Amino acid sequence: MKIIAYITAGILIFFGVLFIWGSGGNGGGGFNWIITGVISVLIGFGLIWFASRKPVVGPGASETVIKIDLPGQTQIEAMKCKNCGGALKPENIKMVAGAPMVECPYCGTTYQLTEEPKW
């Protein structure tokens, strides 16, 4: 949507400048062309401003939820920090760039969770 807004803004600004430029001289369009050109340029810059705004993040923002389907019967084991041996909770696990990362609340170590072979 931003690309369309930028292209439309460029066209409006281009033709607005042409209208302003073409308003003068003996065969020019006169004062009406100046008004048309100024309005066109203002709408073009308004579209650029609107397209360049960042989305508002707040209570109405969407949230991504990742659901994990575990195969078969799974036993939950207590997780401990690899560095200090402190107990880890689910709140300490976050997804970063598609990989589960753990941050230990005790020693501050951050590392990626890896699944170890079951054999």
Image (cartoon, helix red, strand yellow):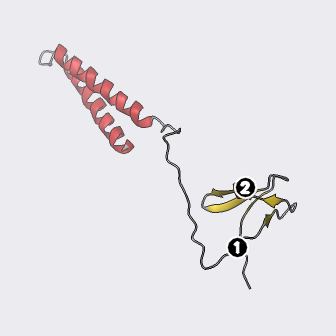
The residue depicted at 24 percent of the width and 27 percent of the height is 18
Q: Is residue 21 visible?
A: no
As drawn, the label of residue 115 is: 1
Most extreme residue toward the bottom is: 119
User: Which dot marks residue 92?
Assistant: 2
Q: Quadrant of residue 109?
A: bottom right
Q: Can the viewer see residue 27 in this picture? A: yes
Secondary structure of the residue carrying tag 1 is loop
Q: CA distance from mark 1 to mark 2?
A: 17 Å
Identified at 22% across, 18% down, the residue is 34
Q: Earlier in the sequence, mark 1 or mark 2?
A: 2
Foreground tag (1 vs 2) = 2
Q: Is residue 53 above or below residue 78?
A: above
- Mark 2 packing: few (<14 Cα in 10 Å), some, or many (20+)? few
Q: For the C terminus, which image quadrant?
A: bottom right
Where the N terminus falls, by quadrant? Answer: top left
